[in-house]
Image (tube, rainbow, N blue to C red):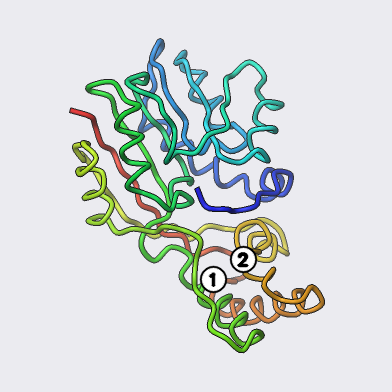
Amino acid sequence: MSSQKWDAELYEARHSFVWQFGKGLVELLNPQPGERILDIGCGPGQLTAQIAESGAEVVGLDSSPAMIGPARQNFPQLAFVLENAATMTYAGEFDALFSNAALHWVLDAEAAARAMNRALRKGGRLVAEFGGRGNIQTIERAIVATITRYLGDHVSASNNYFPSIAEYSAILEHAGFEVRFAQLYDRPTPLEGENGMADWIRQFKWFYFEALPAAQRSQALADVLEDLAPLLRNDKGWFADYRRLRVIAVKP
């Protein structure tokens, strides 16, 4: 996965929407008692625990120690492993793979698709949702424009992978999957609290600001918020311009 730094406390306190929205994806997974399921990019483990409530045997996987630690504390009865989706070595061990809001952090999508296919038993399924083409485009453009202005040099965008339906379907099929369903949709997502956008940026995009001298970061963030307010703030507060790619595929 990417080298994203995580603040698990901030994540759980202000970004619960990540797993709240993921509950519908668990319903789509429809886990069954006795199934062995891998939750890829499990974060603090809330959806891993929800899957386990079905009676399935679930393993939570995440590449961040800052996430695996809280997951093990939150749900000590469940199994969690520190591993990268692109380099995991499972072979024919799972009936299903589940991933919510995680695969856009895996920059080597081809390697991850091969590893996921290898991890499944024949007939097993992948149910995943993550950022798709155009995800957070408004936020990222504002950040890049501001940081570029401060540095006096162009800043490259994104530490994420946001594919189109066609692009990701081709990757999955090349890895041996049969894609049964794929949908790209807009999901404007409310951000919690008066400082919702600032908290979101600090959690997910602060690496941009770390390129600046420490004394300039707060003002740069204020400039970004000023640019974004007319676009991503309404009478109910801040929201993020999310676009999600939802995919169901099977291993024939």
Query: Which residue is situated farthest in the right direction here?
Result: 215
Quadrant of the image containing the C terminus: top left
Residue 78, percent from left and from top = 59, 19
**Which numbered disc covers residue 238?**
2
**Which numbered disc covers residue 112?**
none
- In this view, 209 is above or below 219: above
Q: Amino acid at mark 2?
A: Trp
Residue at 51%, 76% (x, y): give it.
141
Say whether residue 249 is left or right of residue 88.
Answer: left
- Secondary structure found at label 1: helix
User: How crowded is the residue under tag 2: few (<14 C-alpha within 10 Å), some, or many (20+)?
Assistant: many
Residue 39, percent from left and from top = 47, 31
Query: Which residue is situated farthest in the top direction here?
Result: 34
Say whether residue 236 is left or right of residue 127.
Answer: right
- In this view, 216 is above or below 49: below
Say whether residue 17 is left or right of residue 97.
Answer: right
User: How crowded is the residue under tag 1: few (<14 C-alpha within 10 Å), some, or many (20+)?
Assistant: many
Judged by depth in the image, the label closer to the viewer, 1 or 2, is: 1
Q: Nearer the viewer, residue 160 or 239?
A: 160
Within the image, what quadrant is residue 37 found in?
top left
Residue at 48%, 51% (x, y): give it.
105
Residue at 50%, 66% (x, y): give it.
158
Within the image, what quadrant is residue 164 found in?
bottom left
Within the image, what quadrant is residue 165 found in?
bottom left
Ranked by sequence position, the earlier of labels 1 and 2 is: 1
**Which numbered disc covers residue 139?**
1
Q: Amino acid at mark 1?
A: Ile
Residue at 61%, 66% (x, y): give it.
238
